[in-house]
Image (tube, rainbow, N blue to C red):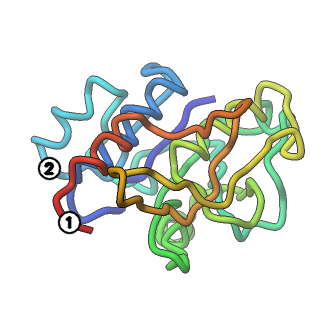
Amino acid sequence: MKFIIEHLEPKLYQWCLAEYGHISEIAGRKNLIFTNIKNKKWQDKLKKYGEVCEKSVSESGFKKICVLSQYSKKTLTAKDKKKFRYLVLGGILGDNPAKKRTNEVINKLKKQKIKFETRNLGSVQMPTDVAVYVSKKILEGKKLNYFKFADEAEIEINENESIVLPFRYAVDGNKVIISEKLVDYLRKRKEF
């Protein structure tokens, strides 16, 4: 199954690049497609991580699509890898509380009369790279209840400051699944 990341941000921020690079490591470059990448410079930056499409997923002719949404009534299972060719993620990580931006993707697909289904990874918002990690493991045979989760991640900035990311992170052993480049980026930021 290929993972489609529908880019919903107005820019290609540094944190996006860190997260997208981590997704490429998790899914594999050949299994990753970025859609809705209008800017040529952004396309060039993302080509090293996966296939890049200028058009939205709703305009790209993909079939057998499943959209991940925390509001879906059905949970993703290993059986879904036989049913779908593409797993679409977009707008998963946003504001807290969530603005339901994944509905932008769903509404575009409905408007274009493209058949698709939705699945969830539980009802709590995850960063996109974590959603790809959990999805990949589920499609390989794990069940959602196999995973340990932390409902926030605290990043130490220096000895006096830290930042709390209020999203659900998978925990593998004692290690939170998070992009090290994102952690470095957060530590180097001048202001929060």
Q: Toward which corner of the image does residue 97 lie, by quadrant?
A: bottom right
Tell me if mark 1 has few (under 14), some (14-19) or many (20+) residues whose alpha carbon lies within 10 angstroms of its own.
few
Q: Which residue is at 31% across, 62% downward?
A: 9
Question: Looking at the picture, how far across and down is residue 47, in whole percent?
Answer: 26, 28
Q: Is residue 144 above or below residue 74?
A: above
Q: Tell me how far mark 2 sits from mark 1, CA to CA.
A: 27 Å
Q: Is residue 53 visible?
A: yes
The residue sitting at the front extreme is 159
Left or right of 87 on screen, residue 93: left
Q: Which residue is mark 1?
A: 191
The residue sitting at the left extreme is 41
Q: Toward which corner of the image does residue 139 lie, by quadrant?
A: top right
Front residue of 164/35: it is: 164
Q: Quadrant of the C terminus?
A: bottom left
Q: Is residue 86 visible?
A: no
Question: Looking at the picture, how far across and down is residue 32, in whole percent?
Answer: 46, 31
Q: Which kind of residue does numbered mark 1 sit on? A: Glu
Q: Which residue is mark 2?
A: 39
